[in-house]
Image (spheres, rainbow, N blue to C red):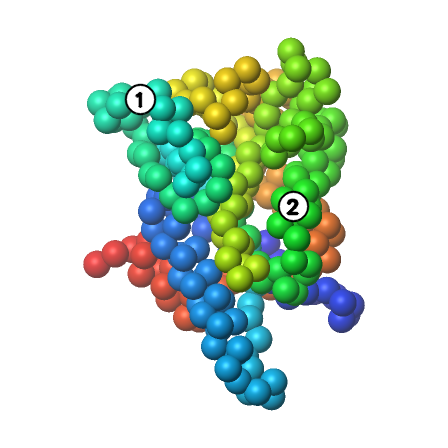
Amino acid sequence: MNSQKSNDPSLKRVFFKDLGKMDYRPCWDVQEFLFTGTTERKLANRSLPANEQLSTEDYLLFVEHPHVYTLGKSGDISHLLLDDAGLKKVGAHFYPINRGGDITYHGPGQIVGYPIFDLDHFFTDIHRYLRYLEEAIILTLAEYGIVAGRVEGLTGVWIDGENPQKARKIAALGVKCSRWVTMHGFAFNVNADTSYFGNIIPCGISDKAVTSMNQELGKKIDLGEVKKTLLSTICSVFGIEIFDGLPATAEAQRSRLNNPL
């Protein structure tokens, strides 16, 4: 994907990296590296005069994970319906992690997005941030003729959300925010095998279904094209300008974690 540059000074610069297919643990480590670097810089700036402070950067990662279940810090372990033998049988890993929310699934055919944003560059409102992420996915789905929206009181993106009997989730959200810096993000089902959601109570919600774009449209979807559309809608919603690749220090860390010695 090419850098989306403009001459509009109001746009915020965001470094973007599509990590392709990557195991969950090393990808989490990359997130932590970027997140910690940003929060530590913000903390250090507090003791420096304005002319010596270093600006923070914003990052956006796209990735496709192998089968994995993750449980947020407020989640209920009983919502994972598999034991260790069951996880091995379906070829999935499990991680309790440091985001909000309950349990969810990541796997092939999903676009998983991890914005590491300093919200001081945008707005310091985590609920607004979540709504913006949802809006970007809603607009992406509209490009494919899929009408989606929200369900009051729940996060994520839903189809037929106004009908409790038909409501089905197509994208889940779960984030961490500290010093107004975010990590974790969203999982958007494009060609996902939704049978894997049968091994959990997704996000702790037992009475609503999960769906994906290929199920809704009855055909396999070009994942790369959806990524391009989603990146464009994220840029539009957040008012950002994308720069391809990570800064050198972050890229070196990503390479080391993805290719351990």
In which quarter of the view is residue 7 placed?
Answer: bottom right
Quadrant assignment for the C terminus: bottom left
In which quarter of the view is residue 240 placed?
Answer: bottom right
Q: Residue at x 39, y 50 (%)?
A: 28
Q: Residue at x 69, y 29 (%)?
A: 152
Q: Residue at x 70, y 15 (%)?
A: 163
Q: Is residue 245 above or below residue 44?
A: above
Q: Is residue 254 above or below residue 234?
A: below
Q: Position of residue 45 (x, y in %)?
A: 52, 78
- Classed neighbour count for the residue bearing mark 1: other residues with Cα under 10 Å, few (<14), some (14–19), many (≥20): some
In which quarter of the view is residue 68 placed?
Answer: top left
**Circle 1 sits in a helix, a strand or a loop, which is it?**
loop
141 or 208, nearer to the observer: 208
128 or 25, nearer to the observer: 128
Q: Residue at x 57, y 87 (%)?
A: 49
Total numbered circles: 2
Q: Position of residue 91 (x, y in %)?
A: 30, 28
Q: Amino acid at mark 2?
A: His
User: Looking at the image, can residue 115 be seen?
Assistant: yes
User: Looking at the image, can residue 62 be seen?
Assistant: no
Is 11 left, or right, of 92 in this rendering? right
Q: Is residue 206 above or below residue 226?
A: above
Q: Position of residue 46 (x, y in %)?
A: 53, 77
- Classed neighbour count for the residue bearing mark 2: other residues with Cα under 10 Å, few (<14), some (14–19), many (≥20): few
Report the residue marked by disc 1: 82
Q: Amino acid at mark 1?
A: Leu
Q: Position of residue 165 (x, y in %)?
A: 64, 11
What's the mark number on residue 243?
none
Q: Are marks 2 and 1 in contact (CB under 8 Å)?
A: no
Report the residue marked by disc 2: 127
